[in-house]
């Protein structure tokens, strides 16, 4: 019979590597949980219109990469390609913004889906941890998020990442720039699709990764020269606050990001060990998104960090995460009676907060000790009928190899004391 494989562009997280993903999610979310961000979870799919309107019809994400489908009931849905539109939708639906507690600060962690050409660091199913601060226009909020992402990466031990920062202006100054850029782009030799893109969303042409396009973009008007005074002052304040926090960044006037909803502050975290899939995370301010999806004006800012690429970045830097062995005690029982007694002790250990595992499957001493080794446990508890008749078990220190007899009744306390 044919066997099944994970679908193209996806992969399974399996032990022992999967612990790294848990550790990365934990490390990214820890600074958020420590800074007033509440956990939010939204469905894996949404009304397709939410992304079409929120992320933007002309973006690659919506026009090429979305898993959109019709349900048996005739609903037009899409697997979520990103988190921000869903989180804002949920916040609006629950009226979180009406409770006089703006900004509403939320964090999330989950799976996202994009129909992309799979390659290293680019998958059709991937994982992000993200944060959104909804309903306040305050440069300190933009700075907070950038600082927290920096803290998250550093806590993992990453060093070779850079923060790219730009301002995209607002609804006052961006249209003026847009027109100037369009004028410039009309003079270039571009393929048909890019010409069309230049008409719909010219800023995204700046994001084109092809060298022949990039070459022609030298001398393009830069947004910085068109920013209005309010946007300039806002951006200067964000830069000053990040600088004061000791977080290094690079001004990148070409940084536009692939989503339509960004205004003012935009940033990206790139890692230099990842080749062309170098963005480990990105985000920015999206002051107009709420209105685009039918809500009131709610200036907001957020980011999403890619878990998959963060793990790749750790590998590229050779960072070994300090992940403690998941099992502290491994019980090896020889014979039926010993199985019953030790299984009971394992349950007791677990209740006492000690990570314990048991030799299942009726293996002999040799096979069971191999399992004990593989578990990474600090101690093995070994007992046969003879030990038990004397009320004893053998406690083996797996590091030193030392073994000593311990009274069965004192096992839990002894183990706890020796682990402490
Ligand atoms: P790229 O320019 O590499 O396509 P993006 O701008 O589309 O990235 P965002 O939408 O900003 O990415 O998503 C935030 C983060 O999520 C990215 O920085 C990346 O780490 C991760 N990410 C995005 N798409 C993928 C994917 N297909 N596979 C793995 N990770 C991804
Ligand atoms: Mg992309």
Image (tube, grey):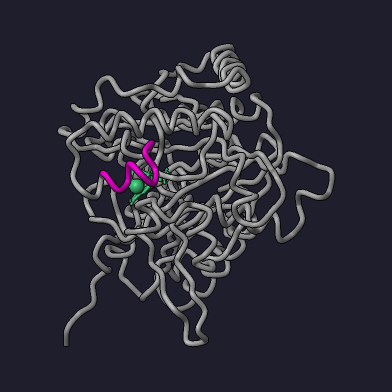
Left or right placement of residue 339 versus residue 286 in this view: left
In the rendered image, residue 279, in percent from the top left (x then y), is placed at 35, 37
In the rendered image, residue 362, in percent from the top left (x then y), is placed at 36, 75
- Is 197 a magenta residue? yes
Magenta region's main secondary structure? helix
Left or right placement of residue 245 versus residue 280 in this view: right
Q: What is the span of residues highlighted in magenta in the rendered image?
A: 195-203
Left or right placement of residue 267 versus residue 33 in this view: left
In the rendered image, residue 225, in percent from the top left (x then y), is placed at 45, 17
Q: Across the whole image, how many numbered discs are drawn on residues?
A: 0
- Identify whether 84 is placed above or below 254: below
Quadrant location, the N terminus? bottom left
Question: Which residue occupies 17% across, 36% down?
Answer: 189
Say if residue 418 shows up in the picture.
no
Question: Which residue occupies 35% across, 56% down?
Answer: 15
- Is 27 a magenta residue? no
């Amino acid at each position: 019979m044919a066997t099944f494989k994970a679908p193209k562009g996806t992969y399974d997280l399996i032990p022992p590597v999967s612990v790294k993903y848990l550790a990365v999610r934990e490390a990214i979310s820890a600074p958020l949980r420590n800074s007033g961000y509440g956990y939010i979870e939204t469905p894996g799919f949404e009304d397709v219109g939410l992304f079409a309107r929120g992320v933007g019809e002309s973006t690659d994400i919506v026009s090429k990469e979305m898993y959109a489908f019709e349900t048996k009931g005739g609903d037009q849905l899409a697997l979520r390609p990103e988190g921000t539109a869903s989180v804002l939708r949920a916040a609006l639906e629950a009226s979180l913004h009406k409770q006089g507690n703006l900004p509403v600060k939320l964090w999330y962690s989950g799976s996202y889906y994009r129909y992309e050409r799979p390659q290293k660091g680019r998958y059709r199913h991937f994982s992000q941890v993200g944060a959104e601060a909804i309903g306040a226009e305050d440069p300190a909020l933009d700075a907070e998020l950038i600082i927290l992402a920096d803290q998250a990466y550093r806590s993992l031990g990453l060093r070779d990442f850079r923060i790219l920062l730009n301002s995209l202006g607002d609804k006052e100054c961006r249209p003026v720039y847009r027109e100037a850029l369009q004028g410039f782009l009309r003079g270039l030799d571009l393929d048909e699709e890019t010409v069309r893109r230049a008409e719909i969303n010219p800023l995204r042409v700046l994001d084109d990764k092809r060298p022949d396009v990039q070459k022609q973009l030298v001398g393009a008007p830069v947004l910085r020269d068109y920013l209005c005074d309010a946007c300039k002052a806002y951006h200067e304040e964000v830069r000053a606050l990040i600088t004061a926090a000791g977080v290094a960044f690079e001004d990148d006037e070409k940084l536009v990001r692939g989503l339509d909803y960004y205004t003012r502050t935009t940033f990206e975290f790139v890692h230099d060990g990842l080749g062309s899939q170098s963005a480990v995370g990105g985000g920015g301010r999206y002051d107009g998104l709420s209105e685009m999806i039918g809500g009131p004006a709610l200036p907001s800012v957020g980011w999403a960090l890619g878990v998959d690429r963060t793990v790749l970045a750790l590998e590229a830097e050779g960072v070994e995460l300090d992940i403690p062995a998941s099992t502290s005690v491994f019980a090896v029982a020889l014979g039926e009676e010993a199985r019953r007694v030790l299984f009971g002790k394992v349950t007791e250990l677990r209740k006492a907060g000690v990570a314990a595992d048991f030799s299942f499957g009726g293996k002999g001493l040799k096979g069971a000790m191999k399992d004990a080794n593989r578990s990474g446990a600090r101690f093995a508890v070994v007992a046969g009928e003879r030990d038990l008749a004397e009320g004893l078990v053998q406690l083996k220190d797996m590091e030193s190899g030392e073994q000593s007899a311990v009274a069965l009744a004192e096992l839990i306390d002894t183990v706890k004391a020796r682990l402490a």
